[in-house]
Structure formats: C-alpha cells, structure tokens
Image: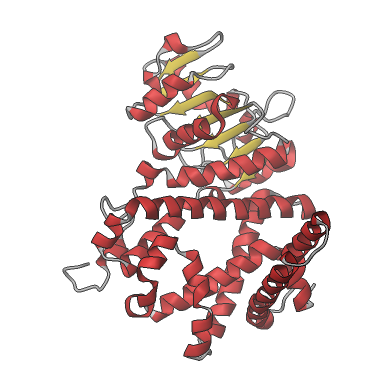
C-alpha cells in the first residue's frame, strides 16, 4: 500500500508488531468474551463469580489466542472460584470434575503448549487426559463439549457448525436438561443459527452470540486504524503501553454496556439472546445510517460541535497526542461516520432498542441530536444538584433518576 502511494498504508492491517496491538499478546478478544461471561453468570445463573464458585468447559487449546487468554483472564479475575472442568483442542482433551489444576493450565498457556501436554499427575480424582492417538481419545475429544457438565460453555476454538440442527440434541442430557445452561461464543459460528434457537426453545439454553461476545477484537482493529491515521509509527510505539491499557479499558466498558443491554432487554421483553444481538446491531446501524445522512447537510460549524463525541470515543492518550490535527489526518467522511456511530451507540445502549424501533426513520437523526442537547442539560442539573443542601440519600436518588431517564424525559419521547 505504501509503495502504491496510499496516505495511510498502516491502516490496511491490524495486529501489527510495532505500531499495532497484537490480539493474542494482549488477549483483546478474550477480554470482551469474559465480560459477557461475567454479566451472563450474574443474570442467568445468579452467580457472582467474584464470590461464588462456578464451572466452565472450553473448546480451544491453551496455546490458542481466545482459549489461552480466556484461561489467564479467568484466573486473574476469579482465582480458584473458576473451575475449568474440561478443555478440548486438536490434540485431545483434559477433564476434571473438581477443576483442572490452575498451575498446570497456566504452564501450558505460558509455554504455548496444547492440552495433550497436560501432566496427568496433576489430575484429581475422576480426572483424565485423552489424546487423539487412540480411537477412544478421538471420541472423547470430539464429544467433550456435549458430555462434560458445566455452568458455562465457552467455544473458543473448533470447527464452524460443530453444533448444528442435526446434532444439537447431543448437548442435552437424557432428561432433556442441557450439559451447560449458558454458552458464551468466543469462537465464530461454532453453533449454527438453527441450533441456537432449538437449544433455547427446547432446553432454555442462554447463548451469547459470537457477533456480540467476541467483537472486542474488531473494536481493537478499528482503534488501530484510527491510530494509523492520527499518529506516526514512532508516536504510537513510544506511547504504546498507555494506549494499549486505555484500549483495554474501552473494551471492558463497551462489552459491559452491550451485555447489560442484552440481558436487560431479554429480561424485559423475552425472546432469544442471539436474536436480540441482531436487534441491537440493527438498531445501532439504523440510527447510524440516519445520522450519517443528516450530518452531510450540516455546516462545518455545526459538525464541529459534535466532534467531542469522536474524541471521547478514542483512547485518551491517542486523542491528547493528535486530536488537534484530526481534520488534517483523518478523511472527512471517516469523521462523519465516526460521529454518527458514536451518537447512535450512545442512544441505543442508554435507551434500548425499543426506543429506536418506535421512532419513524425520518425522525431518528433529529431525535438523536436533540437527545445530545438534553444530556447536556441533565449534566448541568446534576452539577447544580451536587451543590444543593439536602440529605445525601435523597440527593443520590434524584441523581440516579436524572442519570437513568433525565435526557429522555427532557425530550418528551416515550
């Protein structure tokens, strides 16, 4: 791309070694997956993983990107509360109903080793390591994800369509209950659309769809593209530790916002979670498209007023270093699209999909822009309230109400 004269050749590739964020090194996809797991455990199983023990089974090896990093994150966040009762990869599987030894699992991750290298002496009673050099081992590996009982199943590797309309019943026990009541899809397409729906309809399996659960990797790539336009390679590399740290914070924030929205709408309106994932994406896209068209008619002065939305979306260090040069370095259409996307996401994640669905398409952009003004008014009210003398309990309640519904109330759109 550079040889052909493109202005920002580094924007054509993500996960670059120097001026990029290596997805496996920093575990960006798994960081998002684990946020969805955390929220789902609390909503679906009423398990607080910071305080309560839970079990999980995983496809994908300790040497893999998503599975290996998920293991590290599970132990970092929950310690011995997280019990990994089964892992399968291309080399075999390891199982232990009491939880596979964390020291041994992390040894495999750190040394980039597959699961067949798990030391059998580290197994507890009832544990086993199966290798694919025997017929029995192949069979055990192939059906681990169906057979092993766990609170949650994380497909973090494996072949597409592994669970499909023809074999989804193998995920169920003989009494019709699922071997895991919760699936968080770290890997793409492990479960087909039809199988997702049937598992939900027939056994109540709650599935966080891949397009939601593992999108943190895509978000990271988008930040790399922004960095390639805004910063030189040296600027990025000199500030890389801080930028990466801020990107990870953003990933956690966005994943939690969407996860909480999904479960809020699931609990309020019903339906299956995979369908709700599509509804959320559709609502964001509809609002983004309407805003993009509307912004094209704005004067430069009016567009400039919305630029703080784009700045707030960026990691702070990246914005501090170069946002004053955003018009020089970033194409105008990219800025317009970014502003539209940021405002659309803010609206959907705060107010929900029903709010977007009830608005006529021709009014979407106008309401979104008025919403931004209403939010500013609410912030002024909150600031004024902070300095008002009243009992702390009442003040806190009013602040919560303003934060939860003040902007929407100010709009008068319900």
Name the side, left or right, on which 77 lies relative to 398: left
Count every numbered label the image shows and give the total: 0
Q: Is residue 221 left or right of residue 400?
A: left
- Residue 343 place in picture, x, y as percent: 58, 71
Q: Is residue 87 left or right of residue 388?
A: left
Which residue is at the far left?
A: 3
User: In the rendered image of this protein, does residue 257 appear above or below residue 11?
Assistant: above
Which residue is rendered at x = 73% and y = 67% of the image? 387
Viewport quadrant of the N terminus: bottom left
Q: Where is residue 345 in the image (x, y as percent from the top left)?
A: 59, 66
Residue 128 vs residue 377: left or right? left
Q: Where is residue 197 in the image (x, y as percent from the top left)?
A: 67, 46
Indicate whether 8 appears above or below 156: below
Q: Is residue 3 visible?
A: yes
What residue lies at 70% left-to-right and 65% top-to-bottom?
Answer: 351
Q: Which colour style is shown?
A: secondary structure
Up-down: is 49 above or below 320? above
Is residue 205 in sight in this rendering? no
Q: Between residue 192 and residue 148, name the one nearer to us.
A: 148
Q: Say which quarter of the image contains residue 206.
A: top right
Looking at this view, is 148 or 359 the one in front? Answer: 359
Residue at screen point 66% across, 37% down: 41
Give percent across and percent down for residue 53.
64, 26
Q: Which quadrant does the C terminus fall into?
A: bottom right
| In-front residue for pair 144/42 | 42
Asked which quadrant contains residue 36, the reply is top right
Residue found 43% across the figure and 11% down from its top:
120
């Amino acid at each position: 791309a550079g040889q052909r004269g493109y202005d920002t050749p580094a924007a054509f590739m993500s996960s670059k070694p120097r001026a990029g964020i290596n997805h496996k090194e920093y575990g960006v996809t798994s960081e998002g997956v684990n946020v969805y797991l955390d929220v789902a455990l609390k909503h679906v199983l009423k398990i607080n993983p910071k305080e309560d023990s839970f079990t999980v089974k995983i496809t994908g090896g300790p040497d893999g990107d998503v599975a290996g990093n998920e293991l590290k994150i599970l132990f970092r966040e929950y310690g011995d509360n997280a019990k990994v009762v089964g892992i399968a990869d291309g080399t075999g599987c390891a199982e232990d109903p009491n939880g596979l030894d964390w020291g041994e699992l992390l040894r495999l991750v750190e040394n980039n080793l597959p699961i067949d290298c798990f030391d059998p002496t580290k197994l507890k009673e009832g544990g086993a390591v199966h290798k694919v050099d025997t017929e029995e081992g192949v069979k055990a590996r192939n059906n681990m994800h169906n057979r092993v009982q766990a609170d949650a199943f994380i497909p973090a590797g494996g072949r597409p369509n592994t669970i499909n309309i023809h074999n989804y019943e193998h995920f169920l026990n003989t009494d019709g209950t699922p071997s895991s009541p919760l699936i968080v899809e770290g890997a793409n397409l492990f479960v087909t659309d039809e199988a997702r729906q049937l598992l939900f309809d027939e056994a109540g399996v709650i599935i966080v769809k891949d397009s939601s659960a593992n999108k943190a990797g895509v978000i990271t790539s988008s930040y790399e593209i922004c960095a390639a336009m805004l910063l030189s390679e040296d600027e990025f590399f000199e500030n890389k530790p801080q930028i990466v740290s801020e990107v990870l914070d953003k990933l956690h924030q966005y994943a939690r916002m969407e996860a909480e929205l999904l479960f809020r709408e699931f609990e309020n309106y019903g339906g299956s979670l995979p369908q709700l994932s599509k509804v959320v994406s559709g609502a964001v896209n509809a609002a983004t498209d309407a805003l993009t068209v509307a912004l094209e008619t704005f004067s430069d002065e009016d567009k400039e007023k919305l630029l703080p939305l784009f700045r707030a979306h960026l990691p702070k260090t990246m914005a501090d270093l170069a946002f004053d040069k955003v018009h020089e370095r970033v194409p105008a259409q990219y800025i317009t699209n970014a502003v539209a996307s940021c405002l659309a996401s803010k609206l959907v994640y705060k107010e929900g999909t029903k709010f977007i669905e009830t608005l006529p398409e021709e009014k979407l952009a106008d309401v979104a822009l008025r919403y931004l003004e209403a939010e500013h008014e609410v912030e002024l009210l909150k600031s004024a309230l902070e300095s008002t003398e009243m009992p702390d309990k009442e003040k806190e309640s009013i602040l919560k109400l303003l934060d939860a519904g003040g902007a929407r109330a100010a709009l008068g759109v319900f």
